[in-house]
Image: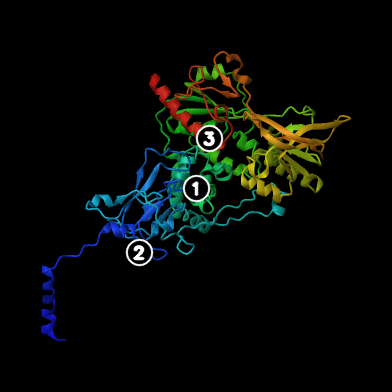
């Protein structure tokens, strides 16, 4: 190397000091940029119609360049948050991790890389589908290779159709530890599931605790809003999963089964410490609860933790309501419900069964001898549709049939009188419960099954859950979806079958329920027994003396939404009789009722 030359060489550039600088007009470059290569990482775009505001992009950003910002023009709705990502390009390193983890593929990188402003604060954007109002070409996007989300649900052991259809055994086996941790790892902890849960459970928190193998924290998070997790870990309607962020591109996280994993595997000593610890000994007063279903048990638990002495009055042999008598044993075994109930009893709640309010004890007496009464008697009555022949003795309602099948499973009654050929009417989960239960009883009695199921809705529009539809089909149900019942044909006092026709429409021009049928499609389904699973109804005999004080509208008790009082002093109501049938909604209603009763009684002191 020539040292002298290397030192003096820069001095040769001094001659440029006297020359005019050459300035390239930025506008020309901006309007006519050179085309970049495919996959170029320029400024972000975000499709707001797809974006659900989950914030996974913000969580993964290694430079903390992404902040979720609330937008007043966006409505809060179940399954979406009213926020969108904003990006600080002074921090962004264009790594693309935000794109690779986006749960809806709304966030992408464009080929746009030109932006000029003397104000550094203006390099902080909230991306939209256009870049600053300008159409831009797509650059880096997520691929199968770069995707950071685990889109497939972890397999869980199930009994095969042949194994399960001739048995009342619980056919879902539950997650192992490795399976649960693997499934928990799929959760992005966005919390969108919580917005859909009627009980607003701390879902991301308990899933994170599973991932960390921390049973104490997991169970603590569950019991903050749900004292019946063993039940809900099996038969919850899992609305949370319907909005799961991962479900936009793949299988939703198995939130319900993860809750079951907690309740089935938490050691008993941890269970007792978590459940017993929050109980207050303040001795606030006495509460009577009429009905031991989801709402009644939930209210009892939370009122007891607040320091009240609570007694549940249940008309039947066992508490649980529809959980105990309406859901088949193969979906919800008694052991799961018994475990939940046992801890409610352990914290000091008294349960009195075979006590019917209105007959064995009056509502007036309960009100007189307690500081408050909570009514949660549920929807345990059977409902039928008034087609010709529906008054025949072999036409049953769902809640006539299912409770007897459950009692049979407990060994308390003889095998239900299920005929060799049965038609079940209805398209919801309860109708599949009736069909699948009938299948099992028929196989036990006759060695074969012959069950038809009829519903007005086509398969894709059935209100039943997907798993009921799939499993019912696997178990051999003969389905007539999109057909409506016309008449139960009775000859010489015996049912010969159900006459059906193909549905043209379910609602009329005024959107009122008014099915119309194609007369040319009439068929007769041969059967000697009909089960109508078309809804349940309440029994308000215990309120007969208070008709002038308690308002009942379309089968539901009207309550003051501020304090849940029903029109009688110190009498409250909740659960199915105020909101309609749904277990998790009833559990939340019981929780909220406990809070309302506590506030109401404290204000009176």
The x and y percentages for residue 405 are 71, 38
Check disc 2 and report its element: helix, strand or loop.
loop
Q: How is the image coloured?
A: rainbow
Tell me which label, 2 or 1, sits earlier in the chain.
2
Q: Is residue 422 visible?
A: yes
Residue 526: % across, % down = 83, 40
The disc, 1 or 3, on the residue closer to the chain's N-terminal end is 1
- Where disc 3 sits, the SS reads helix
Marks 2 & 1, CB-CB < 8 Å contact: no
Q: Residues within 10 Å of mark 3 (few under 14, many from 20)?
A: many
Marks 1/3: CA distance?
19 Å
Q: Residue at x 45, y 59 (%)?
A: 142
Residue in the foreground of this view, choosing between 514 and 33: 33
Q: Nearer the viewer, mark 1 or mark 3?
A: 1
> Which numbered dot is residue 34?
2
Residue 365 in the image: above or below residue 256: above
Q: Which residue is mark 1?
A: 244
For label 3, the residue is 585
**Residue 343 x %, y %:** 51, 39
Which residue sits furthest bottom?
1
- Residue under the image location 12 percent in, 76 percent down: 12
Q: Quadrant of the C terminus?
A: top left
Nearer the observer: mark 2 or 1; the answer is: 2
Count of marks, rendered view: 3
């Amino acid at each position: 190397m020539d040292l002298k030359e290397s030192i003096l060489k820069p001095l040769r550039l001094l001659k440029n000091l006297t020359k005019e600088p050459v300035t390239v007009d930025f506008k020309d470059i901006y309007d006519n940029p050179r085309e970049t290569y495919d996959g170029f990482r320029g400024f972000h775009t975000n499709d707001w119609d797809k974006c659900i505001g989950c914030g996974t992009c913000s969580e993964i950003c290694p430079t903390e360049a992404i902040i979720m910002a609330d937008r007043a023009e966006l409505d809060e709705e179940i399954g979406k948050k009213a926020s969108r990502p904003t990006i600080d390009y002074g921090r962004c390193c264009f790594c693309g991790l935000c794109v690779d983890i986006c749960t809806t593929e709304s966030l992408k990188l464009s080929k746009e890389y030109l932006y000029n402003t003397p104000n550094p604060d203006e390099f902080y954007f909230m991306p939209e589908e256009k870049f600053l109002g300008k159409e831009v070409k797509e650059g880096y996007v997520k691929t199968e290779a770069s995707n950071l989300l685990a889109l497939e649900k972890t397999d869980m052991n199930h009994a095969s159709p042949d194994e399960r259809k001739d048995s009342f055994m619980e056919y879902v086996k539950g997650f192992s530890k490795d399976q649960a941790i693997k499934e928990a790892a799929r959760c992005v902890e966005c919390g969108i599931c919580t917005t859909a849960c009627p009980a607003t459970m701390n879902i991301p928190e308990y899933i994170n605790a599973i991932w960390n193998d921390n049973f104490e924290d997991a169970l603590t998070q569950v019991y903050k809003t749900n004292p019946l997790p063993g039940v809900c870990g099996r038969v919850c309607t899992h609305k949370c999963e319907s909005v799961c962020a991962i479900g936009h591109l793949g299988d939703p996280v198995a939130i319900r089964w993860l809750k079951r994993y907690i309740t089935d595997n938490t050691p008993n000593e941890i269970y007792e410490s978590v459940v017993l610890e929050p109980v207050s000994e303040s001795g606030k007063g006495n509460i009577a609860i009429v009905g031991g279903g989801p709402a009644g048990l939930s209210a009892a638990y939370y009122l007891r933790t607040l320091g009240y002495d609570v007694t549940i009055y249940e008309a039947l042999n066992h508490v649980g309501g529809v959980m105990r008598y309406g859901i088949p044993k193969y979906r919800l075994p008694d052991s799961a419900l018994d475990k939940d109930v046992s801890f409610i009893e352990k914290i000091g709640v008294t349960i009195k069964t075979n006590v019917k309010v209105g007959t064995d004890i009056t509502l007036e007496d309960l009100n007189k001898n307690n500081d408050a009464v909570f009514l949660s008697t549920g929807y345990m009555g059977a409902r039928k549709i008034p087609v010709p022949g529906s008054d025949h003795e072999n036409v049953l309602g769902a809640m006539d049939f299912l409770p007897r099948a459950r009692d049979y499973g407990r060994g308390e009654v003889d095998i239900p009188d299920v005929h060799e050929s049965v038609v079940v009417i209805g398209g919801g989960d309860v109708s599949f419960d009736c069909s699948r239960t009938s299948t099992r009883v028929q196989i036990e009695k006759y060695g074969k099954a012959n069950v038809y199921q009829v519903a007005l809705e086509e398969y894709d529009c059935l209100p039943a859950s997907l798993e009921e539809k799939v499993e019912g089909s696997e178990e051999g149900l003969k389905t007539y979806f999109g057909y409506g019942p016309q008449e139960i044909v009775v000859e010489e006092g015996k049912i010969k079958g159900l006459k059906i026709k193909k549905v043209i429409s379910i609602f009329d021009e005024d959107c009122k329920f008014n099915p119309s049928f194609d007369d040319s499609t009439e068929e007769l389904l041969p059967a000697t027994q009909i089960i109508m699973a078309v809804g349940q109804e309440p029994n308000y005999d215990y309120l007969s003396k208070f008709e002038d004080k308690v308002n009942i509208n379309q089968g539901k008790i009207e309550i003051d939404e501020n304090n849940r009082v029903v029109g009688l002093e110190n009498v409250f109501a909740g659960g199915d009789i105020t909101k309609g049938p749904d277990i998790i909604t009833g559990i939340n209603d019981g929780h909220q009722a406990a809070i309302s009763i506590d506030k109401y009684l404290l204000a009176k002191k």
